[in-house]
Image (cartoon, grey):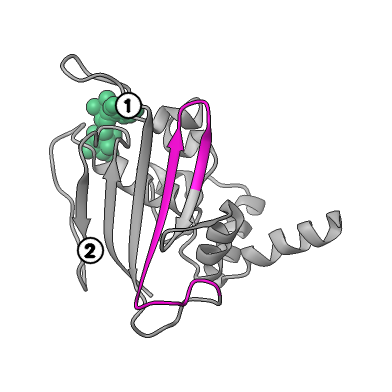
Amino acid sequence: MRFSKLRLTGFKSFVDPTELLIHDGLTGVVGPNGCGKSNLLEALRWVMGENRPTAMRGGGMEDVIFAGASSRPARNFAEVCLTMDNSERLAPAGFNDSDQLDIVRRITRDVGSAYKANSKDVRARDVQMLFADASTGSQSPALVRQGQISELINAKPKARRRILEEAAGISGLYQRRHEAELK
Ligand code: ATP
Ligand code: MG
């Protein structure tokens, strides 16, 4: 599956609906400091199920909702939609009913997050597993945060192992084992 589009609404600085088309090959995002480049990468992580507010540079998850500016009031919800090309029908069972797969995450103040896959309600876990198994998950080494390279160099062995496991595509298995042990 290939990412083809990211749409943000009320997410951080992207108050108005904004679409980023992701074409084949390399996509570069350039702009002055503070224009929202890192926010785009965070939106990608977030829609894939990231649940640590610190990974979003926030104190709580609702901090991703547009907080208002001098001329614009704050929003009540934030939504990110990630569109994937599924024309080769590589999506796992339950997600594989069309040539395009839209994963939507919406957070509403005082309500929390809800996810949809092609307009149908799905659980956070299903979305997290979908991406963890595809090795592109919210904690994937394919997504490199600002400052992460120096963190990696200084990482303890256990933290480095987690990165290798995610790259090997086995991190979804740990969650499944953990859930099996709880049953
Ligand atoms: P740099 O080049 O310095 O790395 P950048 O392009 O990566 O900058 P970001 O860090 O993505 O910029 O964007 C920061 C901007 O997003 C700041 O102006 C900040 O005020 C704004 N921002 C972050 N969260 C929110 C929010 N919840 N509501 C409104 N604006 C927000
Ligand atoms: Mg940045």
Q: Nearer the viewer, residue 149 or 69?
A: 69
Percent position of residue 166, x then y: 56, 63
- Residue 119, how many percent across, how many down? 42, 59
- Kind of residue at badge 1: Arg
Residue placed farthest to the bottom in the image? 88
Q: Which residue is mark 2?
A: 22
Q: Residue at x 51, y 50 (%)?
A: 49
Can you tell which of label 1 and label 2 is closer to the viewer? 1
Residue at x 50%, y 34% (from the top left corner): 53
Q: Is residue 127 magenta?
A: no
Relative image position of residue 160 (x, y in whole percent):
58, 55
Q: Which mark is first along the chain, 2 or 1? A: 2
Region rendered in magenta: 94-114
Residue bearing mark 1? 75
Left or right for 93, reference 14: right
Disc 2 residue type (three-letter):
Ile
Ligand 1 resides in the quarter of the picture at top left
* Quadrant location of the C terminus in the rendered image: bottom right
